[in-house]
Image (cartoon, helix red, strand yellow):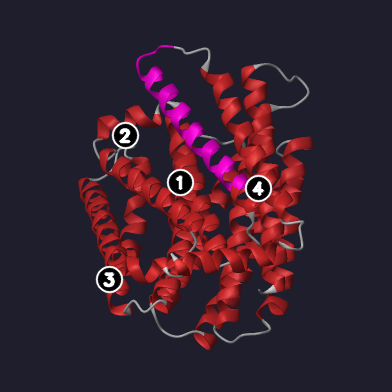
Amino acid sequence: MNQPLKQWLRISLFNLIIIAFLGTLMRYKIAYAFPFIDQRNLLQGHEYFAFAGWITQALMSLLVHYLVENGDSNAFARYRPVLFTNLFAAYGILLSYIFLGFNSFAVLFSALIIFVSYWFAVMYWRDLNHYTPKNSSRRSFKAAVFFNVISSAGSFLIVYMLITKNIQPNRYLATVYFYLHFQYNGWFFFSCLGLFIHQLIKYGTPDQKLKMIYLLFVSACIPAYFLSALWLPIAHWIYVAVVAAVAVQLIGWWLLIRVLRKETTRIQKHVSPLSKALFVLSAIALTIKLLLQAGSVIPSLSILAFGFRPIVIGYLHLALLGVITLFILSYITGMQLIPVNRVTRIGIVIFTSGIILNELFLMIQGISDLYYRALPFMNPLLFVATLTMLTGITTTVYSQKFPGDDQALILEKADTVKS
């Protein structure tokens, strides 16, 4: 097991505890009362830290490990300054928002996070060309860092609007969704796709099949942004491009499922039951997300959906928790990148249950809002869901303290191969 990767993943998972704790605190404040914190500032810190401190920190670590697997034994030593700077900036923006709100420090740390994304993109693009073979995994990683850089335009515009206090609601929302889209559906998605394709190639899947899947997804990414802006007046040709992007993404996902069905027997020999279950849930979440996107091409549904906060929150959590987070947990457990024992499995099951409950309750709340009916018991239930996630991820991280867990990995792998 790569020791630097193990350490960086533990740090990332600990950051996930902080995110779950902040989410629980916000839900408690909504359901009951907690006058000592500013909800808006806490929300901003929570969001930025979730992106930089958990997802980006974990993905950067896994992408560096990909270089190690391809023979670059000094990759973690070379990327250590990048990883440390991203971690420093993530904590900086978290503490700035929580204790001071939007201020010069928040702007400074936001700029530092953007600088790190550029730094990582330049280094990683160069190293991909130098150390890795030309296949769809490398193509996906290049797309990931490219879209991460693209998303920074949204960050710059958001900060500019806040500093100048020239905030036009439609323009501001369109800018926020620009940033979110190229983070969720660009940087996050293509990093995960690259990691997954990398494993499929290792298991013997021909790259020719995977290249078409990559091309379909990457061609749809930019026009798919306008799915989040259909409530704005847009040109007819842009709407046609959006509908085409939705269709292309569905085709790409269908082709990937076909590949998985043909390779099921081969893949099952290499992954644990826990990893397989997490991946299936992540795949289900991605299927729901793509179907929701398909439904949102109807302008009236798009306006309706983006007009109700629980629906927007539910969709964003579906992408961040259901698709991305569950995939990362599936990957790091399936590839045996962290120790996994009985306590780890229990923690992940509890955490996953919290995600499912959270999505279920947000869906119910969103439907009730559509009919303008308030359900007073939903906020306490959402608090319970976030508390469940906090309990689960805390248990998972706590299980990493036991030095004997590596043996559990060996036993689990042996059981999987026998089955």
Which amino acid type is shown beneath numbered disc 1? Ala
Query: From the viewer's perspective, is 188 left or right of 89?
Result: left
Q: Mark 2 or mark 4, which has the lower sequence index?
A: 4
Per the model, the C-alpha gap separating discs 2 and 4 is: 31 Å
User: What is the x, y in percent for residue 381?
Assistant: 55, 22
Location of mark 1 (residue): 319
Per the model, the C-alpha gap separating discs 2 and 3 is: 29 Å
User: What is the x, y in percent for residue 324?
Assistant: 49, 52
Q: Mark 2 or mark 1, which has the lower sequence index?
A: 2
User: What is the x, y in percent for residue 382?
Assistant: 55, 26
Q: Is residue 402 above or below residue 126?
A: above
Q: Mark 3 or mark 4, which has the lower sequence index?
A: 4
Location of mark 4 (residue): 16
Q: Mark 4 or mark 1, which has the lower sequence index?
A: 4
Q: Mark 3 or mark 1, which has the lower sequence index?
A: 3
Nearest to viewer (mark 2 / mark 4): 4
Q: Secondary structure at mark 4?
A: helix
Mark number for residue 302? 2
Q: Is residue 358 above or below residue 92?
A: above
The residue stretch that appears in magenta: 346-373
Nearest to viewer (mark 2 / mark 1): 1
353 magenta-colored: yes
Q: Could you tell me if the residues under marks 2 and 3 are in contact, i.e. CB atoms within 8 Å?
A: no
Q: Can the viewer see residue 337 in this picture?
A: no
Q: Mark 2 or mark 3, which has the lower sequence index?
A: 3
Q: Circle 2: is it few (<14), some (14-19), or many (20+) Cα within 10 Å? A: some
Which amino acid type is shown beneath numbered disc 3? Met
Q: Could you tell me if the residues under marks 2 and 4 are in contact, i.e. CB atoms within 8 Å?
A: no
Per the model, the C-alpha gap separating discs 3 and 1 is: 23 Å
Mark number for residue 49? none
In what quadrant of the picture does the C terminus appear? Answer: bottom left
